[in-house]
Image (spheres, rainbow, N blue to C red):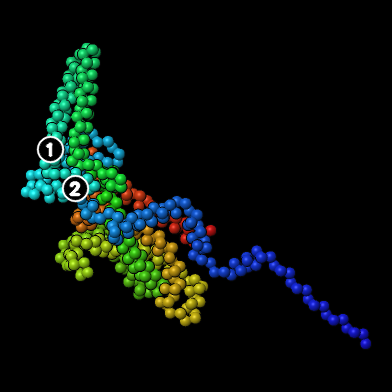
């Protein structure tokens, strides 16, 4: 009998290329947060990332101010750095402003010398990084006398300079000859040079009493005076920077509360429907029927008149930011609630929601595990919108005297305090507050657009 051929052993499969194996393994590897299409699209958005960096910088500054050691303390913000309404933003001080500064410092030294304890008064006399030079009372008196002598000399020179200018104007009105006008104008130039020399001599005498800071103190002092001073002689730059903390604090608290309440109520209304939906719709429709600004004013005013003390803080509620938080939180959740309600009504008809219902998942679990996570991108967008609305609302309330309590800086308080200065052409306090608010609000507007482009299913591609 013929022997049957033995079956040949199957050939070993060829080894797959390493890159193909890696590709297959990668196909089953769970994707991380930064691998999601929306996140990748947002990271590629340069304007969105730039706005996020700007917002992060503001938040870092706010945190550095809030926690010790404070970047800027409230005492530094409230302390006087010099005479009031000094120009800022690189505008050169006119001679009369420079005279006012010199007269201010000389007058403060004179007040200290006239006190009952001149040594102690001189030791405590300090304007930001500038303080009286350490020397005896007699030496201070001598330096002060020299300063006033320079001031008197400057006064005489100033009179001569003004008389020379008046003479030129009179000659021009009378139609004087060219030679006579030339001599008069030359006298004005000479008088101006003498005036500048006398003014410089006066400032030198003042610097002997109040030496200008050096090193790091010089940088901080220049930063204080960068945006000028307000009517009380306080640093506008420090007030504007410190107000970042106030704006961030109000925006964060109210925006977080608004999106949480809006997401829960809107998600419940859209998912459960029925009586829950009717109750939520009635609530936000009632709130929406009253103008937004009216709600803010009424709520803030009610709490401003209350004497109730906050237990943990130990001070009246009117001296805290709680009225501002409540005024914004009561109104800002409505927009989030409407958006989430509409999205939840669409999501609950999806197949994966129906599958969860069929396997017996509780409605509350479906809402928390499936509905709300799928509207998270809307919460990001509404958070930025609520943050911006809170900042702008604070400005309105503070301008009306119902916002941030007295003594605490904010951009709204700065704008309110500058309304009389603007008429006189003093715009630096208004300009500093408006500039800082514009940067933060504009950054949040760009961020909200970038988030919508990245995470909205209509835009993701």
Q: Which residue is mark 1?
A: 142
Question: In the rendered view, would you say 95 is above or below 331?
Answer: above
Q: Which residue is mark 2?
A: 126
Left or right placement of residue 285 versus residue 121 in this view: right
Q: Estimate the x, y position of residue 263 in percent, counting from the top left.
A: 37, 67
Left or right placement of residue 373 versus residue 166 in this view: right
Q: Estimate the x, y position of residue 223 in percent, counting from the top left.
A: 29, 46
What residue do we see at 27% from left, 50% from top? 238
What residue do we see at 43% from left, 65% from top? 376
What residue do we see at 50% from left, 62% from top? 34
Tell me which corner region of the image, top left, top right, bottom left or bottom right, holds residue 374. bottom left
Question: In the rendered view, would you say 7 is above or below 409?
Answer: below
What residue do we see at 51% from left, 59% from top? 40
Left or right placement of residue 301 versus residue 35 in this view: left
Q: Mark 1 or mark 2, which is nearer to you?
A: 1
- Decide which of 404, 392 is in the foreground and name it: 404
Q: Estimate the x, y position of residue 142 in percent, counting from the top left.
A: 12, 38
Residue most extreme to the right:
1
Question: In the rendered view, would you say 230 is above or below 334?
Answer: above
């Amino acid at each position: 009998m013929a022997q049957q051929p033995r079956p040949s052993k199957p050939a070993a499969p060829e080894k797959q290329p390493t890159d193909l194996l890696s590709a297959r393994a990668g196909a089953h590897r769970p994707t991380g947060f930064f691998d999601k299409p929306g996140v990748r699209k947002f990271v590629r958005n340069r304007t969105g990332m730039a706005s996020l960096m700007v917002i992060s910088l503001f938040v870092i500054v706010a945190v550095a101010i809030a926690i010790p050691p404070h970047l800027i303390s409230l005492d530094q913000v409230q302390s006087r750095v010099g005479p009031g309404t000094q120009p800022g933003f690189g505008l050169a001080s006119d001679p009369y402003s420079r005279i006012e500064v010199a007269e201010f410092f000389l007058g403060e030294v004179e007040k200290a010398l006239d006190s009952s304890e001149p040594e102690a008064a001189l030791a405590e006399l300090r304007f930001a990084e500038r303080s009286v030079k350490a020397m005896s009372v007699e030496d201070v008196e001598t330096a002060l006398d020299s300063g006033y002598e320079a001031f008197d000399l400057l006064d005489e020179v100033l009179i001569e300079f003004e008389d020379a200018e008046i003479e030129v104007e009179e000659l021009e009105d009378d139609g004087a000859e060219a030679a006579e006008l030339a001599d008069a104008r030359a006298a004005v130039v000479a008088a101006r040079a003498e005036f500048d020399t006398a003014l410089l001599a006066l400032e030198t005498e003042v610097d002997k009493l109040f030496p200008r800071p050096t090193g790091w103190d010089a940088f901080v002092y220049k930063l204080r005076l960068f945006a000028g001073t307000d009517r009380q002689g306080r640093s506008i730059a420090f007030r504007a920077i410190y107000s970042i903390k106030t704006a961030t604090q109000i925006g964060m608290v109210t925006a977080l509360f608004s999106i949480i309440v809006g997401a829960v109520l809107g998600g419940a209304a859209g998912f459960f429907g029925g009586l829950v939906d009717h109750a939520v719709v009635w609530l936000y429709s009632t709130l929406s029927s009253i103008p937004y600004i009216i709600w803010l004013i009424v709520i803030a005013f009610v709490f401003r008149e209350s004497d109730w003390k906050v237990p943990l803080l130990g001070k009246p509620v009117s001296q805290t930011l709680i009225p501002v938080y409540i005024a914004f939180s009561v109104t800002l959740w409505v927009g989030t609630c409407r958006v989430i309600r509409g999205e939840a009504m669409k999501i609950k008809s999806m197949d994966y929601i129906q599958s969860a219902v069929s396997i017996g998942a509780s409605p509350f679990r479906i809402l928390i595990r499936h509905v709300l996570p799928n509207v998270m991108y809307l919460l990001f967008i509404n958070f930025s919108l609520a943050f911006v609305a809170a900042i702008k609302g604070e400005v309105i309330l503070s301008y009306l005297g119902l916002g941030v309590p007295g003594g605490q800086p904010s951009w709204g308080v700065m704008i309110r305090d500058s309304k009389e200065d603007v008429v006189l052409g003093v715009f630096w306090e208004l300009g500093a507050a408006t500039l800082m608010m514009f940067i933060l609000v504009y950054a949040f507007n760009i961020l909200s657009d970038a988030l919508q482009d990245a995470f909205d299913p209509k835009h993701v591609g």
